[in-house]
Every structure is written in structure tokens, then in C-alpha cells.
Amino acid sequence: MAEYDVIVVGAGNAALASAVSARVSGAHKVLVLEKAQKEARGGNTFFSGGLLRFAFERIEQPIELIPNVERDWPEYRHGIDPYPEQAFRADLMKVTGGRSDPELSDILIKNSYATLRWMKEMGIPLEPARSFGGEPAKDGRGLEGVRKGKGVRWQPGCVIRAVGQGKGLSKSWFASAEAKGVDIRYDACAMELVLDPAGKVTGVVVREGGKIKTIRAKAVVLGCGGFEANPSWRAMYLGGKWDQAKVRGCAFNHGDGLRMAMNIGAVPYGNWGGCHATPISADAPAHASREFTDKTNRLSYVFGVMLNAEGERFLDEGLDFHPTTYALYGRLVLGQPGSIAYQIFDSKVLDLLEGRYATTKPSTADTLEGLLDQLKLNKSRALATMQEYNAAAGHGAFVPTKLDGMHTVGITPPKTNWAQKIDTPPFAAYPVTGGITFTFGGLKINDKAQVIGNNWEPIPGLYCCGEMVGGLFHDNYPAGTGLMSGAVFGRIAGASAAKALMRTASKPAAAARRGAASKGRKKR
């Protein structure tokens, strides 16, 4: 006999959304297996900024999700614009080169707002998106939007986050799951899936408390992330210098769920050579600190320039707002000599840097020459690069709240927006490297979040959500889409598993009713 209706492997946003969804959809006994100890629980969610990108047609839709927002945030209504489905789809396709799976992306986008409403109903409090790190900006508010004068403009689609960022989101999901009677086991490492003779998944082999045991279930949902913490797999699938990259998220994501699923014939899918990366402080630890969570991110490069150790610029810092470039640019930074770059700013923009920059002290000087003397780079070439940039910059008017078209002329790479001259002391430099957040390669699923086997049919009893879903992201990623995708497909996976159980349970009852009716006819 099965011990549980549904087992969920993993304990981040997607996994807990799945567990709660299964429970409220009719599954009576739901178990969550968390590989980490309780004090290290929460997966990548804990280390995120809590941003949730979603589609909405009317400004009132996000306002309805945030208690007292009109009273506490009077600038909110006037600082956001509708973000319809076509805008979300355009951003997703733009950053992925049109390669996001059309069926999966459609499910994500069309269910995003409804899922956010459901999350609120399940006990996840929401608030206006502040800076990703949640640190106060110069005015003490720490907004994700850019302040201009007395107003604030939020970036398209980036208008709501979970209260308390990822740490708060994780805490709220655990509270919701526990309140609904979901069992949670910590230090419980899933090792392999159990199959019955018909090929249905019927449980999980687990290492727990120093023992190997089999826990039976009627359905299993895999929501335990990618392989970003596994240097061997990073070297194998991502190549280059990725085995040496710093992990800005969970230290427990080694690809366990992917390995278990593929061992029973699940189809690998999506961009296995791609990942979500981020420019982070070069002083960041090898794995993200639970104290600093995502506060090592350095994403205000749009207002300055980045130089590598050879003193060269190597990308267009102003190509777009950072939510649509930072995942790609983290990869480019990692590929530079020594996997390091320097973000250079002048005093005109220092008050625009997001709050997370306050977690380290920059190198500062009253001259560019004096600043570059403090950095580990080719100083003569770096000074020439800065002089060439300043000679080419300044064409247009600087407007930090929009793609302002202020550009460079005659240099490669160009800077497309926010290309002010860097000429006003004091000057500041922040060293950065490329940190990995999660991997894009995953499993093939259908619209019910069922895992597809190598016969191109669903594997009975097996579902998947979160960063294990393959096909959504390629090379790049729009900020806030990962958590939203996790919640959307987590909700679908849990509900699908519960509904399948109810259909299965109804079959014996229906057969019994038919048998009883047949006996009654024979007696007559």
C-alpha cells in the first residue's frame, strides 16, 4: 500500500507550490522531501529577490494584490504600466532568440496572473517590487523602479515581489504547506524512482537518517532544481570555465532529479548548454551566503561601463534594462580573462546604483587615472579605452527611467542607451565575476506537467516543475520569470497529480457499482 498520495522532491518555490496545490486539489497525504537540513532549507528560492513577472492588462490588477498599496505607496499607481500578454511574450522571445517552447511559454504567460492571485490566497504576501536585494536606495525606499524627481517608474513586468524577497517567499510557502497538513522531511536525499511492473512511478528511494528506505506514493512530483551546484556536470554540459564558477544560490542542486528521471527514460529537453548567470561581486563566496542571499548581485552596469582585465570593454552595457540582460552578461563576464571585470561609474550616477552595491566598498578616486591605478588590469589600455569611450559618448539626453537612446558613436562595442560621459569625480569601481544561478537544461513535460518518456508518452505517476522544466529559457532569461514559472508549473503539477489520483480512485468504485447492478439484474 502507498504511504502517501503524492511525494514532492524538493522544497523551493515550485516544489512547495506543487505540494500545496496537490493538497488543496484533493490529495490527502502529501510529503515533501528536502535534501537540506532544516536550517538550510528552501532551495534557490531562499536566495532570490522574490520578483514575480506576470501579465496584466489593467493597473488595478497588481494593485488588488497588495494590501494598502494606495495608502503606503502613493507613487505606485502612477509608476507602473500595463504589461499585457503580448509584451511578456515579446520579452521572453527577445531574450531567448525566439527559442522558448511556444506551448510552455503560452501556459506560463496565460496563467501568470491567475497563479499570482492563487499564491496570495494560499498565504503568500506580496508587495511592490523593490530593489532585487531589498536594500534601501538613497532615499531610503529601495525601490525596483528608478526615482526621477518626486516620481518612480517601475520597469515593465517588474512590479511585484514576495514580501521579504526570496527568504520571505520561502518562509511563507513552508508556513502554507504546514498549515495545510503537508508532511516535510529534512535531510532526506532522493536517490532513485521506484517503478511497478507496468512502468508507473510508485515511490522514491531515499537516504534519510543514515538509512536507505523506500517511500511509496501514488504519484511523484520532481521539483528539486537543476545542476548548477555540480561542477562535474557544469563542465560536461556548460563547458568553458563553468566548473569554476561561483554559485549564487543553493549548494544542494546537483541534478539529482534530472538523473533519476532520465534513468527511467525521461526525455532531456531544452538548452542544456545554457544557464542563468549574473554579474556578482568578485568577493562573493563559492556558494551563496544565507546572510547575504542575493545581495552580491551587481546589476547597475547600465549606468557605467565594464572593463575586463585587459582594459577593454566587451559588451553593450546599455543594450536594455538589466532585467533582460543580466543573465546573459553574467556568462560574458565569466568568459573574460581571469573571469573578472570592473564596473566603472562617476558621481553623476552613484545615487542610481541599486542598494546591493552597499554590501561592498568600491575603489574610489578623484581621477580616472587614480582609479585605474587601484585595479588589477592593463592600466594603459584601460585609460585609452575610457578616453575613447568618453570621446564617443553623450549623443542624446540621459533619462534613467526609459530606454533613452543616449548612445555612443564610432566605437565597438557600442553603448545603446544611458551612454553618458564618465567625467565627473569622484569615480568608483566595483570588481565583478560571473555567478551561476540555475541551469536551463531540463525535462520534457506536457500541459499537465507530466514528464514525457523516450516513447514520447507521459511516464505514469511522474510530474515535474520549476527549474527542472526544460525548454522555457535559452541563453538568457527575463528577470522574475523563474519564480513565476515555478509557481505556475508547480500549481499545475500538484493539481494534475491529485486529479489523476481521484480518477484512479473512482474506477474501482465505478466497477463495484457496475458489479452490483449486474448482480441485481441476474436476481430479477
Image (cartoon, helix red, strand yellow):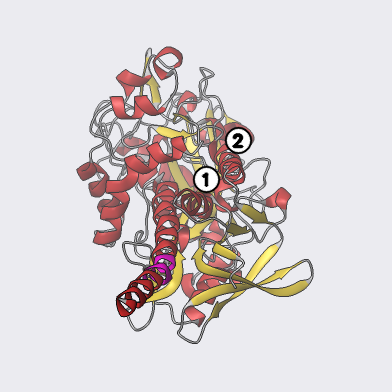
> Which label sits on residue 362?
2
Quarter of the image for residue 287 reads bottom right
Tell me if I can see residue 328 in this picture.
yes
Above-or-below relation of 50 to 137: below
- Residue drawn where x is 55% and y is 24% of the image: 136
Above-or-below relation of 205 to 144: below
- The residue most toward the front is 524
Q: Is residue 82 left or right of residue 237?
A: left
Q: Which residues are magenta?
A: 504-510
**Residue 259 % position (x, y):** 53, 75
- Residue drawn where x is 41% and y is 72% of the image: 512
How would you rate the neighbour count of disc 1 (Cα within 10 Å): few for under 14, some for 14-19, many for 20 or more?
A: many
- Residue occupied by mark 1: 342
- Give the position of the C terminus as an image quadrant: bottom left
**Residue 345 % position (x, y):** 47, 33
**Residue 215, magenta (yes or no):** no
Helix, strand or loop at mark 2: loop
Q: Amino acid at mark 2?
A: Pro
- Give the position of the N terminus as an image quadrant: bottom right
Q: CA distance from mark 1 to mark 2?
A: 10 Å
Q: Between 393 and 296, which is closer to the camera in this rendering?
A: 296
Q: Between 408 and 112, which is closer to the camera in this rendering?
A: 112
**Residue 302 % position (x, y):** 39, 38
How would you rate the neighbour count of disc 2 (Cα within 10 Å): few for under 14, some for 14-19, many for 20 or more?
A: some
Above-or-below relation of 73 to 232: above
Q: Amino acid at mark 1?
A: Tyr
